[in-house]
Amino acid sequence: MIHKNQFDAVIFDMDGVLIDSEPLWKIAMEEAFHSVGCSITREDFQQTVGLRIDEVVRYWHSERGWDGLSCEQLEDRIVQKMIALIRANGDPLPGVLATIHYLSKSGFKIGLGTSSYRVLIDTVLESLGLTDSFDFTHSAEDEIHGKPNPAVYLTVASRLNVDPKRCLVIEDSFNGIVAGLAAQMKVVCIPEKSHHPDPRLAIATETFEDMDQFLKTFKND
């Protein structure tokens, strides 16, 4: 069980936690991969959830291969499509705004650690009206290794000046949960609804149906 007095900071993942962007990623990636003749299905993308987009593209290039665009060009095509999709469909997931408001009012430091690139962090936070809501935001693009490596979360804890053991991570993917636990943080899992159920998510410290349920428990523990 988690108790709010265990923590000085809460660190959010972004995709699938703050915003229902996982379906948008599947649209953007499917469109981009198909444009180079690489017939990857949305079910295939389940294998790479939580990885940086450059790692996803390199993985599928090694698995399936394609001609016409470099990995970097395909990455850019996906990112540009994501920016457009987020701006058109950017709504916070249930409970997100109330949770961030409560944490801020209660004196917790609030961080963001995501595999998404900085341009997407800025796009999401602007779309959700959360640009000024975080004490520090960080992209794994600035780390040597992305999730499941803990580097992104350790950097956020360091910049927040909080002991990692006093940080709570909120995640939706197995790779993200592994990263948080490897950083010696407690990890709440709120499973992303468009993915197939993943029994591996049970390694999280605690699991909630949605952010509203998490907030209710966190406030009343």
Image (cartoon, rainbow, N blue to C red):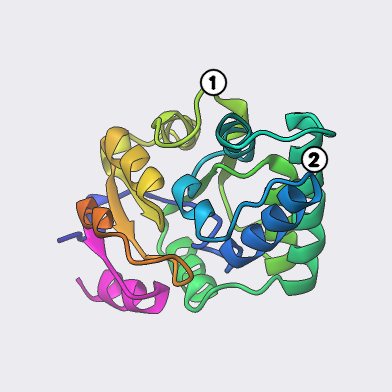
Report the magenta stretch's main SS.
helix
Which span of residues is magenta-colored?
206-221
Say whether residue 86 is magenta: no
Label 1 vs 2, first from the N-terminus: 2
Direction from residue 60 to residue 201 in the image, left or right: left
Q: Which image quadrant is residue 128 in?
A: bottom right
**Residue sitting at x 70%, y 41%:** 118
For label 1, count other residues whose C-alpha is less than 10 Å away and answer few (under 14), some (14-19) or many (20+): few
Percent x, y for residue 58? 61, 31
Q: Are marks 1 and 2 in contact (CB under 8 Å)?
A: no
Q: How many marks?
A: 2
Q: Nearer the viewer, residue 49 or 149?
A: 49
Quadrant location of the N terminus? bottom left
**Residue sitting at x 73%, y 35%:** 66
Say whether residue 214 is magenta: yes
What is the number of the mark on residue 76? 2
Instruction: Point out the residue furthest to the left here.
Output: 1
What is the number of the mark on residue 144? 1
What amino acid is labelled 1 in the image? Ile
What is the number of the mark on residue 21? none
**Residue sitting at x 47%, y 37%:** 160
Between disc 1 and disc 2, the foreground one is: 2
Instruction: Point out the residue furthest to the top here.
Output: 144
Percent x, y for residue 196? 39, 66
Res. 184 in view: yes
Quadrant location of the C terminus? bottom left
Q: Which image quadrant is residue 150 in?
A: top left
**Residue sitting at x 50%, y 65%:** 100
Direction from residue 220 to residue 45 in the image, left or right: right
